[in-house]
Image: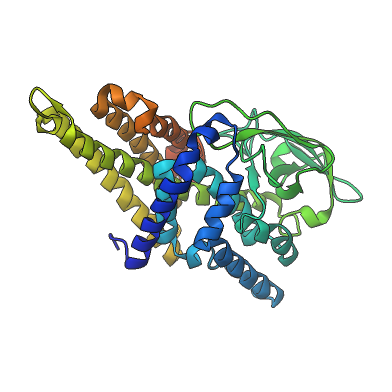
Amino acid sequence: MFQLDESSRMVEKMVRGWCEAKLAPRLPALEAGTEMPWALMRELATTFGVGALAEAAAKKRIAKLRAGEGGDREGGTFGGDPMMMAVFVKELSRVSPGFAMGWGVSVGLAGGAIVGKGTPEQIERWGVPLVTTKQIGSWCLTEPGAGSDAFGSMTTTATPTDAGYRLRGTKTFITNGPGADVFVVYARIDRGEPREQQGLATFILDRGMAGLTTGTPFKKMGMRDSPTCEVFLDDVEVGPERLLGGAERGRAGRSDTKDSLGTERSGIPAMAWGILERCYDQSVAYVRERRQFGKPIGAFQAVQLKIADLYLKLKTVENCVYRLAWMQKAKVSDPAYVNATKALCSQLAVDGALTAIQLHGGYGYMEEYHLEKLARDSKLLELGAGTTDINLMSAARTLIGQEALTREG
């Protein structure tokens, strides 16, 4: 369980080679915003055949749904092997956590939500193009006033009309927003009842629809190669065919959204793994070669302690990824572990990147050594998919029991 099999090792080697040859040279342009990552995403999918695997899995689900069979989504990228997928994300994150984030949101969150919850027609129309990267997707939950309190503070509404629904609201911090073809949008169903009684629903929108516009890409501390913006919904008229799943689910719609959040949080440790592995590998090589006071700096105890600390962080995150992959494969649900692990791995990635910079001294502060980018990018892991505090609170509430926390007397 705690080592990669031959197939995963092969994926690791091939994806690392692609990232070094294709992705790394494009980073300056991607970070500057003079080039968008969409073409590279499609090249990646084609090079490794992951689009074809995902398409086959989606079509299998369509056939089962049409035959009256439900069940969980099967297959997907790399035939549904979660450890192989983690290795794939890890290798992308060694070079560009931002690129890995954009890929994961488009294929895993937007595409995954449609393939996992959509009707056969929705999967054909929108799901297959997303998981094959023929189209780029965005996942629109966060709002200017609704971040950690995504449900309670959500103001985006879907008002029922004779022809379907009318959407109004603003979404923010939307990954892939500037170039997305498809927008998976979460909104309250507003029939005039009190907010606490309103259900949550998911809608599938296309770029170019009347009333849907996107803002200017944000200027960010990190993950600059992952274009992000606001999405504005100004009386967007949609038909019932764009309601994910084909029917309103009332307050159960929140559970569907939490499923997607759980998927996102499960992917963050693999990104942290890639960041820490690059920091560790590069730091060990550096302290062996860098000489001061007549000997390699790795001979000094203070440096040795930092290397050992980096190694411990790396192996902690690596072991978390292995367990998450086992849980996914065995269909084991453990929300507390997912939330706590996301929080822990995010913190270790940030701390580890800063430790690597410290070991490299002034060189670590320079763009040439890549560590400053990993440090900038890693900070978003502590903020996205729920802040660290929210992740830990969610884990604690699961462990203690929400009913016990709200009981009076």
Residue 119 appears left or right of 339? right
Residue 9 appears left or right of 89? left
Report the label total.
0
Q: Which residue is situated farthest in the bottom direction here?
A: 67
Residue drawn 26% across the image and 28% down it? 360
Residue 382: percent from left, percent from top:
44, 34
Residue 399 appears left or right of 47? left
Question: In the image, is residue 68 above or below residue 81?
Answer: below
Tell which of 382 and 174 is nearer to you: 174
Question: In the image, is residue 348 above or below residue 164?
Answer: above
Residue 49: percent from left, percent from top:
53, 63
Residue 384: percent from left, percent from top:
51, 37
Residue drawn 67% across the image and 52% down it? 135
Q: Can residue 22 be seen in this view?
A: yes
Colour mapping used in the image: rainbow
Question: In the image, is residue 65 above or below residue 323?
Answer: below
Residue 13 appears left or right of 331? left
Tell which of 221 and 334 is nearer to you: 221
Residue drawn 71% across the image and 64% down it? 124
Q: Which residue is situated farthest in the left direction here?
A: 294
Question: In the image, is residue 76 above or below residue 372?
Answer: below
Tell which of 26 and 55 is nearer to you: 26
Q: In which quarter of the image is the N terminus?
A: bottom left
Q: Can residue 309 be seen in this view?
A: no
Residue 138: percent from left, percent from top:
64, 44
Residue drawn 67% across the image and 37% down it? 178
Tell which of 90 and 314 is nearer to you: 90
Q: Residue 193: which quarter of the image?
A: top right
